[in-house]
Amino acid sequence: MSNTARIRPDVSLDDQLVADALELNIDLSSAAADGIAKAVKAERERLWLIENAEAFAASNRYVAEHGLPLARYRQF
C-alpha cells in the first residue's frame, strides 16, 4: 500500500471476531485494508468482464465461424 493520506472510517465489526483477531495478534488495520483491497480488485475485475462481454462474444463468434486465426501454424 502507498504512503498516501489515511482516513479513519467508522466501521462496525462483530465483537467476537475482533476479540479472536486480537487474541491471535492480528493487526486489524492491515487485515481490514487487505480485505478491502481484495474486494476492490474483485469488483474491478467483475465490472471489466461486464464492460468487455461484447468483445469476448464477438471473438468467440469469429472463432466459431472461422476457426483460430493461426491454427495452420500449430504443431500439435
Image: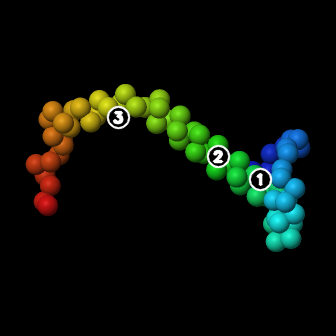
75 vs 21, nearest the viewer: 21
- Count up the numbered dots: 3
Q: Is 27 drawn above or below residue 65 in the view shown?
A: below
Q: Secondary structure at mark 1?
A: helix
In the image, is 35 to the left or to the right of 25? left
User: Quick one: which residue is furthest to the bottom in this view?
Assistant: 24
Residue placed under numbered mark 2 in the picture: 39
- Rendering colour mode: rainbow
What is the CA distance from the residue labelled 2 to the residue labelled 1? 10 Å
In this view of the protein, can residue 53 be seen by the observer? yes
72 vs 14, nearest the viewer: 14
Neighbourhood count class around disc 2 (C-alpha, 10 Å): few under 14, some 14–19, many 20 upward: few
Q: Mark 3 belongs to which amino acid? A: Phe
Mark linked to residue 56: 3
Task: Name the quadrant of the C terminus.
Answer: bottom left
User: Quick one: which residue is furthest to the left in this view?
Assistant: 72
Q: Is 57 drawn above or below residue 67 in the view shown?
A: above
Residue placed under numbered mark 1 in the picture: 32
Mark before the other along the chain sequence, 3 or 1? 1
What is the CA distance from the residue labelled 3 to the residue labelled 2? 24 Å
